[in-house]
Image (cartoon, grey):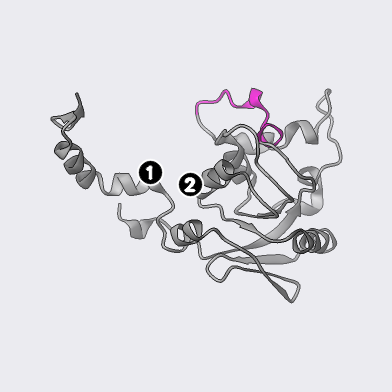
Amino acid sequence: MTTDEIPAVESVSGTGVPIRGNDIDTDQIIPARFMKVVTFDGLGEFAFFDLRFDENDDPKAHPFNDERFQGASVLAVNANFGCGSSREHAPQALLRWGIDAIIGESFAEIFAGNCLALGIPTVTADSETVETIQEWVEANPDDEIDVDVAAETVTYGGTTADVTVDDAQRKALVDGVWDTTALMKANAGEVQKTAASLPYVEDGERA
């Protein structure tokens, strides 16, 4: 594998889904009881589970249960999204539900880092811009939003708003170097060579 095989994420387009509320933590995104899995496959159906279903597993009013937003790939959230535990299962669940990009007022740092590791941009805007986008999505659930990572803009319904993408995140996504695991595999020879040169590593293995 070469770095060319890691897809660059210059922009993401798709219909939107709004999740309102500040300080939505990772336990709300994916409750802990669903984390006892060998792989992340299937986690999508449990995203926001306790907010979507009551104690009898009957559905409640929630955007992820709303027929209008099924198939959406751009999530619009408010402040401090993804706070709490650093569990990587949270962005994994969102990815497997179908989310490819998230627009919000702010994100917990570790959550944003875990999103980057999956190639999911987390772009920020002021509260007024985010609220306008959420309202537009609710009124236009079938229309697409374009999140331009490189240009740091979000375009919807003929309106283009400026957003912010962390410099390191933008470079990693646009240059296609966001998948660190793939990069290490692609450069396994260099990794082994470096390991062999370290004084505390013996024969390429930790002493």
When the figure is inspected, residue 91 is found, relative to residue 36, above or below; the finding is below
Residue 190 image offset from top left, x and y in percent: 21, 47
Q: Quadrant of residue 90?
A: top right
Going by the image, does 3 lie left or right of 35?
left
Seen from the viewer's position, the closer of residues 71 and 73 is 73
Q: Amino acid at mark 1?
A: Thr
Please give the name of the residue rendered at 68% of the width and 34% of the height, measured from the top-left corner. 46
The location of residue 206, given as percent across then percent down, is 22, 27
Cα distance in 3D space between marks 2 and 1: 9 Å
Say which mark, if any, is on residue 181.
1
Residue located at (63% from left, 43% from top) = 94
Say few, some or many: other residues with alpha carbon within 10 Å of mark 1 (under 14 / 14 to 19 / 20 or more).
few
Residue flagged by tag 2: what amino acid is it?
Ala
Task: Give the structural element (helix, strand or loop) at label 1.
Answer: helix
- Horizontal placement of 6 versus 147: left or right? left
Tell me if label 2 and label 1 are in contact, CB under 8 Å. yes
Quarter of the figure with the C terminus: top left
Magenta range is 26-38
Secondary structure beneath dot 2 equals: loop
Q: In the image, is residue 8 above or below residue 26? A: below
Q: Say if the magenta span includes residue 113.
A: no
In terms of depth relative to the viewer, which is nearer, 188 or 168? 168
Residue 47 screen position, x and y as percent: 68, 37
Residue at mark 2: 117
Q: Is residue 77 above or below residue 35?
A: below
| Magenta highlight on residue 28 | yes
Residue 115 picture location, percent across and down: 55, 47
Ranked by sequence position, the earlier of labels 2 and 1 is 2
